[in-house]
Amino acid sequence: MTHTRPTSPGLDAILGRQFPVLDHGFIRVVDYMGNDAAIEEAARVSYADGTRKVSETRDLLRYLMRHRHTSPFEMCSITIDVKLPIFVDRQWMRHRTAKHANMNEESARYSEVREEFYIPRAEDLAMQSTANKQGRGEPLSDGDAARVLEILQWDSHRNHMDYQKMTGLYGLSRELARINLPLGTYTTKRWKIDLHNLFHFLGLRAEHHAQWEIRQYANLMHDFAEIWCPLATEAWRDYAFNAVSLSAQAVAVMKRRLAGEVVTQADSGMGKREWGEFVGEFGG
């Protein structure tokens, strides 16, 4: 069969299939454009079809990623349907990468909000971290976790009953009645993003400091990227996601260490926090 556009057989095989995330969420790949070869073609502008080897494509894509030549990666795009809690969507759309995407969301002004709310698993309930102001610390005890789940379940159910009462009994418009619903309410959106900005999203949201719930979505999006553009995704992992960026001061310290010199924070030119991060990666 002759294709009229670059394709990904792996992604073609899962188009339209829902992959569950959390308790009521999912991601579904709707469409895509481009593949690894399309990135190479965009970088080279034009080359004779069939004359390139996979190894040569891989080398070029790694060169592009290594030297931050990002525009060829923008030639590929993916469109998904995603169902997620509103508080996760707030994080999803928080960063500038969202401005490079096309997005349309289910409207609670036009349609009735379903009684679908995110309820965490007991093992995912944790206390506020003492080291990270926006993260989780030690898990709750079994008893406290059970009580928290009871509160979450009852509040979500009660709020939805009040929503139905306001729209049904009192005839309040849906656009006003929805303001009483919690951030755990599920919404559905269609999202189109180019590969370069998808990598940026993954770098923020698949990273281990990101909130656990959004990491579940980001991890699945990473899996889709690997199926779709495996060479580009490998290059991104090697040169961006799993790489370490060094300041000029850190590079100078590494050179002095390699020369056998003992370097301390006091004579490194780095502040306390930067030195701590440096030591965490390379040792004291």
Image: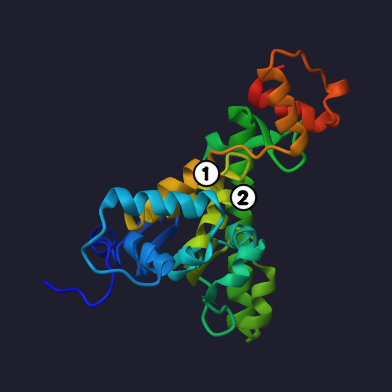
Residue sitting at the far right: 266
Which of the marked residues, 1 or 2, is nearer the chain's N terminus?
2
Residue 91 appears in the figure = yes
Where residue 216 appears, x then y in whole percent? 48, 48
Where residue 210 appears, x then y in whole percent? 61, 45
Horizontal side, residue 259 vs residue 112: left or right: right
Residue sitting at the far left: 1
Depth check, front residue: 40 or 141: 40
Above/below status of 75 relative to 62? below
Above/below status of 220 relative to 161? above
Depth check, front residue: 134 or 96: 96
Residue 219 appears in the figure = no
- Image point (41%, 69%), residue name: 42
Q: On the image, numbered disc 1 is attached to which residue?
A: 239
Above/below status of 213 relative to 187? above
Three-letter code for the amino acid on which mark 1 is drawn: Tyr
Above/below status of 279 relative to 57? above
Image quarter in which the N terminus is found: bottom left
Three-letter code for the amino acid on which mark 2 is drawn: Leu
Horizontal side, residue 79 vs residue 97: left or right: left
Q: On the image, numbered disc 2 is attached to which residue?
A: 152
Helix or strand or loop: what does disc 2 sit on? helix
Depth check, front residue: 119 or 36: 36
Helix or strand or loop: what does disc 1 sit on? helix
- Image point (64%, 86%), residue name: 173
Which of label 1 and label 2 is nearer to you?
1
Q: Quadrant of residue 274?
A: top right
- Cα gap from disc 1 to disc 2, whole angstroms: 41 Å
Q: Quadrant of residue 80?
A: bottom left
